[in-house]
Image: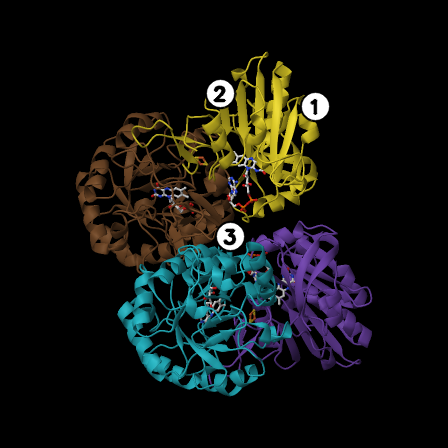
Chain colours: A yellow, B brown, C cyan, D purple
């Protein structure tokens, strides 16, 4: 069940340039079903900004009732968020949507987790759960530049990890796809910019491939039709899925990206 | 003491609070949060004859104290609304106001005829004011004579009272209101969104794929209040007010202006529990302000006693 | 590199930032905070033939991300503006845009004739859109033919270019813009305020003594952007844009929409230093966005290169 | 000169029900000319609320560069203000307007300071300055009810002090004017609700009488014409004073209240 809750902030740290890791205490943790789900955050009690902001759950801890998000300080909402301190409370709605299906890989198989920039965070919980299940996990994490890189060590603990930067200032120069050619895996889970997801869909249509999409949202729960995408197979021309409540994770080929 | 019971044409409302059309889908999502029977009514998403996908995304953009939307009347179409959504809603003890949209007069008439037969549809809301569809629409919402004709045609076929939803994007809102009253409207709902736009700082291009969108939220409340103030004094049919309502205080302000009930749109996205919260807080606020019944607030900005017989229980 | 120099009919502007009429008096108060010569121009308070006291107080009311005002064109009258205010302003190296108001056509014509003779008045801004005066006004701002006639009459007597200030309270802003262009307007300024209202929770009565007022501030920015986007593509005279501008980012958004300069109103009340701050931040932002000159931003929402010859230095 | 300054909060205390005493550190203190001037405060960095709020300077300390305000938590702005804590910064514009002319009483004379509710605060600095000058000071402070009473002790230190409450729950029951009949004084300085100021103007037109007015404000500095009042003697029908920059204190009879 989706809950609306005022969650006390436990910690907030800048882990890379403009990238913040935020942990809150929240009863709604008990409702999380899958890695890749997200929450909808009100960054101010006031009207400015008005709308909630969708942020992925990057990891959670049922026992201690807390979960972590990693976000980039961008516009008004995330800038306000970045100023908040432990002890303050955040108005959070969640957990929302459907995440990555871990049942799609079995313990002997290898899963490739591909993240681009601020698409990396939800893969962390996914990685943890896959490893716990005995799946062999490889991570390919793409960033713009050195200062934007985060969580490399954390992912390394779970398995092989390749970091790429567009400008070559860290790790391998290039895009995530430049690394993937040499790797063997049965299933891909990916989250990142649309261009990255499109490239994956084009090149790896033969694999099991799950993509987490982004779309501007109103309600975040499926009521406003802000975040729809078309079905790939759409004879009627009017079929759709909602990123917020049907997604954000879809099987490649299911919807048009 | 029941301070909130209100009667309007076709509608016996437990309370005068209802979610606004397009901001509540067909109720399923919000039913996860509370019992929909708590609501005064539900204004469901616009229904058209055929299913519509609507506009390309992005469909929403935030603005200061508001938001733009250009959903483009996405809906599953008349048949599905009648066969799936309305029956699902009938499990709740709450009157439904069906928002009727279309491009041509015939479309409106077809939807109105069919949807008004559904048992739990107690009123229609004629959406002649959607700023996000390119064909038709605009003339219906901005030319008094055209709006009047459409109202008349819909009244002829509807089995339930017809409320007409007015667009604020006009020079003279009173003229529009009088025209649809002349056309036989049983009530008005106002306001729909103001046409607005936002551009992306990096690309220079519109944030919305549809270029323009409808501005809703607290930003537009002063415009809505002014229009309801003007219209409520010029017509003798009741008004369901909307535009930026977020709190019990806002509801009272709408009643003072001349509304007889109030719809809540954008605020549902900010707080999914906003409607039941307002319904809970209203009686307390009324008591504090010294009112025995909410209808006493109505029209107080222009009339000493703020009360008209027809909408008091 | 000078990224900000802009030329418009009658106006060679150091930068395209100016305080909006009515939000800066005649400059005296803000001269305590900074050198007014830093400004691109100054749009002075509306001037009428006779001195006016304006409306009773309260004259302002806050709204969400905005405010209502019903000042009612208080001003010391044409004579004093010419004998005291304009000479005082002439100590600054800044072109003045005189806002011309009235109830009758003759009033506008008289003010325009006289005030356009003042040496530092480089342009007129014909205020056909003030929502806070009861007589005249409204027709000028809402009926295209009437606006056109007035523009023509004023053009006949004015020694300097005439900009017409459009009201957003109309069904069709493009029609109004084209009419005044036809009437000979050299430029447009838009938008004036949206008519709005607020009611007091305790009394139920309007907060403003004038009942309704003009809504300004960030709340109306999306409406202004949309209107400028529409109008800038339909006319070939330049637009000075306004409505909720608070930052350099907002200025760029206005240019993208199609404005050639930008005025700042309500934000002066929030931060008296807002204009010089924007002027300082603009070149930095332009550089960051990759523009050599602000004119490159103009019209980018609808035209690839966003540049028209006439307003580039 | 008027300054716009970010002022760190030194202390904030609730001194009566919904009445807060707020002290800030501010260079602008050096610019204060008279008791009865005010500042214009932005209660939020964000847009909500948009406008500044006028609040009187209730006392100041040039040496330590700090000043104190006393305000009632009412609507949005003052409610936000009430939540602020020491160390946070407030965006303040001031000092604004013209205050009470202390030169109007000489050291042998008696000044009567009449305050109603939230009009009491600016009288405190006035009282201090008059006493310092050797003026005999009497205070009459009117409140709604016991829980709203504040600063009685502080005023008592400066001179005779009468407190009235409308409901009689504290001090003398009634209005400030009910007490004044028995007192002797040469000059009245008053701040409070319009009804109180009107009553004073009516009954004490024979005395030197200075009234501090309130009006809704836009700019607070004289530019927007929001806060004008008419001159009492106004043959032209268009003469005016601005409460923000000509006032808020006027000599009785000068403007219409
Ligand atoms: C399902 C989902 C999960 C996400 N998870 C993360 C995450 O874990 N970490 C992270 O840093 N970011 C994440 N994002 C992107 C994040 O929502 C935006 O960066 C954020 O909303 C920007 O808000 P702002 O206030 O900084 O920007 P503003 O520019 O002030 O935002 C204005 C409006 O645009 C919307 N918006 C702007 N950018 C985006 C975007 N990329 N996607 C959707 N809406 C946007 C905002 O929500 C807001 O309504 C996620 C987005 C989605 C849809
Ligand atoms: C010169 C002057 C000095 C003042 N000094 C004090 C003081 O020392 N202590 C104190 O508690 N109050 C003082 N006030 C009143 C104070 O300004 C208001 O109580 C305050 O603005 C209310 O703001 P809010 O956010 O609580 O209310 P809201 O209802 O949110 O305010 C909405 C709008 O109305 C305005 N407004 C509301 N009430 C008043 C009012 N009474 N006067 C002027 N504007 C108002 C606000 O400034 C704002 O623009 C003074 C007012 C003036 C004009
Ligand atoms: C996302 C969204 C979708 C909307 N869809 C409809 C619609 O289908 N039919 C309609 O009449 N109004 C629609 N509206 C307008 C609302 O019903 C309401 O008139 C308007 O939003 C003002 O109220 P608010 O400020 O409370 O949102 C929509 C508004 C929003 C924000
Ligand atoms: C207090 C106030 C007074 C105004 N007076 C005038 C005026 O005299 N003439 C005029 O053309 N516009 C007047 N305006 C409108 C502004 O010039 C401007 O068009 C409008 O406020 C929108 O800009 P903003 O949102 O930046 O304030 C006034 C606005 C305000 C807030
Ligand atoms: S955000 Fe409202 S339906 Fe997805
Ligand atoms: S508040 Fe602007 S002139 Fe006084």
Q: Where is residue A256 in the image (x, y as percent from the top left)?
A: 41, 31
Depth check, mark 3 against mark 2: the one in front is: 2
- B284 or D37, nearer to the observer: D37
Residue where numbered disc 1 is placed: A157
Real-space Cα separation, disc 1 to disc 2, in angstroms: 25 Å
Q: What element carries label 3?
A: loop
Q: What element carries label 1?
A: helix
From the image, which quarter does the N terminus of chain D lie in?
Answer: bottom right
Q: Is mark 2 on a helix, strand or loop?
A: loop
- D109 or A186, nearer to the observer: A186
Q: In which quarter of the image is residue A38?
A: top right
B183 lies left or right of D103: left
Q: Position of residue A214 (x, y in %)?
A: 49, 35
Q: Residue at x 76, y 64 (%)?
A: D155
The answer to whether tags 3 and 2 share a subunit is no
Real-space Cα separation, disc 3 to disc 2, in angstroms: 38 Å
Point out the residue furthest to the top here. Answer: A108
The numbered dot on residue B201 is 3
Q: Position of residue A191 (x, y in %)?
A: 54, 31
In the figure, A120 relative to B306: above or below?
above
Real-space Cα separation, disc 1 to disc 3, in angstroms: 40 Å
Disc 1 sits on a residue from what chain?
A
The numbered dot on residue A207 is 2
């Amino acid at each position: 069940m989706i809950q609306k809750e005022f969650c006390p902030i436990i910690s907030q740290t800048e882990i890379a340039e403009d990238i913040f890791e935020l942990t809150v205490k929240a009863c709604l943790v008990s409702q999380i079903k899958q890695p890749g789900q997200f929450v909808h955050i009100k960054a101010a009690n006031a009207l400015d900004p008005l709308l909630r902001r969708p942020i992925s759950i990057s990891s959670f801890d049922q026992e201690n009732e807390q979960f972590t998000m990693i976000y980039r300080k961008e516009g008004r909402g995330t800038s306000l968020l970045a100023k908040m301190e432990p002890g303050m409370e955040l108005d959070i709605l969640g957990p929302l949507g459907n995440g990555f299906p871990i049942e799609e890989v079995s313990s002997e198989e290898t899963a490739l987790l591909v993240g681009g920039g601020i698409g990396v965070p939800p893969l962390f919980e996914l990685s943890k759960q896959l490893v716990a299940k005995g799946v062999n996990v490889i991570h390919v994490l793409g960033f713009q530049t050195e200062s934007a890189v985060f969580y490399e060590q954390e992912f390394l603990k779970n398995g092989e990890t390749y970091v790429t930067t567009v400008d070559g200032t860290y790790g391998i120069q290039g895009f995530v796809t430049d690394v993937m050619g040499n790797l063997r895996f049965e299933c891909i889970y990916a989250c990142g910019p649309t261009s990255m997801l499109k490239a994956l869909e084009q090149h790896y249509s033969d694999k099991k491939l799950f993509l987490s999409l982004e779309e501007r949202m109103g309600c975040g729960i499926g009521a406003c039709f802000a975040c729809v995408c078309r079905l790939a197979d759409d004879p009627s021309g009017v079929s759709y899925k909602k990123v917020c409540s049907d997604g954000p994770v879809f099987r490649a080929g299911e919807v048009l990206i | 003491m029941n301070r909130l019971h209100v009667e309007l044409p076709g509608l016996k409302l437990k309370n005068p609070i209802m979610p606004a059309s397009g901001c509540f889908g067909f109720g399923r999502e919000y039913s996860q949060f509370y019992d929909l029977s708590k609501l005064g009514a539900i204004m469901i998403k616009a229904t058209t004859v055929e299913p519509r996908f609507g506009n390309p995304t992005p469909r929403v953009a935030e603005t200061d104290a508001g938001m733009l939307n250009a959903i483009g009347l996405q809906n599953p179409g008349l048949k599905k609304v009648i066969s799936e959504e309305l029956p699902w809603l009938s499990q709740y003890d709450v009157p439904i106001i069906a928002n009727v949209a279309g491009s041509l007069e015939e479309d409106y008439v077809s939807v109105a005829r069919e949807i008004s037969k559904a048992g739990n549809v107690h009123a229609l809301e004629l959406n002649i004011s959607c700023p996000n569809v390119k064909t038709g629409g605009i003339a219906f919402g901005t030319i008094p004579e055209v709006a009047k004709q459409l109202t008349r045609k819909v009244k002829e076929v509807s089995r339930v009272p017809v409320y007409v939803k007015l667009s604020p994007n006009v020079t003279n809102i009173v003229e529009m209101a009088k025209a649809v009253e002349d056309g036989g409207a049983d009530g008005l709902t106002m306001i729909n969104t103001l046409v607005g736009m936002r551009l992306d700082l990096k690309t220079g291009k519109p944030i919305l794929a549809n270029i323009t969108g409808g501005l809703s939220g607290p930003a537009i409340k002063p415009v809505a209040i002014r229009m309801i103030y003007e219209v409520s004094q010029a017509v003798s049919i009741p008004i369901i007010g909307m535009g930026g309502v977020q709190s019990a205080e806002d509801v009272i302000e709408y009643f003072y202006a001349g509304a007889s009930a109030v719809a809540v749109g954008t605020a549902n996205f900010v707080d999914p529990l906003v409607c039941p919260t307002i319904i809970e807080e209203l009686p307390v606020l009324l008591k504090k302000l010294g009112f025995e019944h909410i209808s006493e607030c109505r029209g107080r900005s222009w009339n000493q006693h703020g009360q008209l017989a027809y909408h008091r229980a």
